[in-house]
Amino acid sequence: MSKRQSDYLNSLLGPDPATMESAAEPVTSAPPLADAANPGNTSPPLPSARTGPGMTLLARESALARVAAGEVKQVTQLLLNPARVRIWEGNARHQQSLNEASCRDLIDSILAEGGQKVPVVVRRVTDDPEHDYELIAGTRRHWSISWLRANSYPDLQLLAQVHTLDDESAFRLADLENRARKDVSDFERARNYRDALRSYYGDRQVRMAERLNLSKGWLSKMLLVADIPDWAVSAFSGLGDIQLKACYPLAQRIKTLSQSDPAALKRMQKEAARLKQAQHARLADGVPGLTAAEVSDALLKAAQPPSQEQESLFAADSVHGRRALSVLSANRNGATLRIHAGSGASDAELMGLVERALAFLRTQGRGVAE
């Protein structure tokens, strides 16, 4: 983490008066660890190398002086039941995407290390009888501990630091953590930024960029990506595919068409529905989904004015979602079929598409054998 981000994080996680100990230990001692059920029961500090009543008193007075001077920040760490910790709605991570596969590396790490080592950040809540705390940062750790408790490790608890944070400070803290997470997509962050812009910054992008230490131009692009409509989002294989670089041109085009060309927008919507079906078919066949670049290109192409090329009577796509075969005409002299290059279809797949095309022509009374 850069020095700038480190200073920014320290400003967010200053000492919490609600969790400060009445007496501080020397800076070399371990931070106290408390059980949520018995908050006064903290583990003893590591013993100092220098012992004796006089040295203990001097060390305590020195430590208190350093706390008073702001040189030492001490925060109580609690062991919590994750079921009593709710997820803050302002967190960017798409909770539905968390599962055993996406958290497997973290689950294995917790088991290998004998427990969770990096604490989550929570704040107390008093308006919810089913929860005592609200999770600000650490959703994967929270999910992983919850999963382990339900799968053979019922005694595991969630290691947490409690801080007093308002919503805007909580948002900045969660955003700072998510910047280093590759599994939080640009789209998830973008929609999180859009909601925060309205809730905390009065729709003032300049103010938001200053508070988050972000480029104004970059934030503007992210907010435009956040406005990609759901019908377009459904064409991608997952939210993780929607990244700024590949999808910003698409977001620009959709915004322009929504204001100037409803017909082109409808063509794009129709193509998005086709891509959605293709993505489901590929998933069912165990084939990798179309990439974000492929989806964006297909949607942008669909928005272009129709060409003067003869409209096909029948068209079929390959399992890769690209046009593979078209029937251009069918009459008493026969049928004209076009096999498209670059579809990725195998010979066997093409033969199957030809059979489908001939069957379609028979249902239309245009069968070549009639």
Image (cartoon, rainbow, N blue to C red):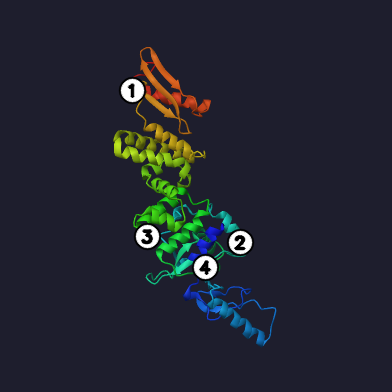
Are the two marked residues, 2 and 3, in contact with CB atoms closer than 8 angstroms?
Answer: no
**Dot placed on the residue nearer the N-terminal end, 1 or 3:** 3
Q: For the residue carrying disc 1, how many other residues have a C-alpha within 10 Å: few (<14), some (14-19), or many (20+)?
A: few
**Residue 363, located in which quarter of the rendered image?**
top left
Are the two marked residues, 2 and 4, in contact with CB atoms closer than 8 angstroms?
Answer: no
Q: Amino acid at mark 2?
A: Leu
Q: Amino acid at mark 1?
A: Gln
Q: Residue at x 53, y 58 (%)?
A: 4
Instruction: Answer above or below: position of 145 versus 314.
Output: below
Instruction: Answer above or below: position of 325 versus 153.
Output: above
Q: For the residue carrying disc 3, how many other residues have a C-alpha within 10 Å: few (<14), some (14-19), or many (20+)?
A: some
Q: Which residue is mark 3?
A: 200
**Residue 49, located in which quarter of the rendered image?**
bottom right
Secondary structure of the residue carrying tag 4 is: strand
Q: Residue at x 48, y 47 (%)?
A: 240
**Dot placed on the residue nearer the N-terminal end, 1 or 4:** 4
Residue nearest the viewer, comparing 181 with 68: 68
Q: Residue at x 50, y 54 (%)?
A: 179
Real-space CA distance between mark 1 and mark 4, rounded to the nearest whole angstrom: 67 Å
Q: Which residue is mark 1?
A: 364
> In front of the other: label 2 or label 1?
2
Q: Amino acid at mark 3?
A: Tyr
Q: Amino acid at mark 4?
A: Ala
Real-space CA distance between mark 1 and mark 3, rounded to the nearest whole angstrom: 60 Å
Q: Which residue is mark 4?
A: 160
Across and down, in percent, residue 24 comes to 57, 78
Q: How many marks?
A: 4
**Dot placed on the residue nearer the N-terminal end, 4 or 3:** 4
Real-space CA distance between mark 4 and mark 3, rounded to the nearest whole angstrom: 26 Å
Q: Which residue is mark 2?
A: 111
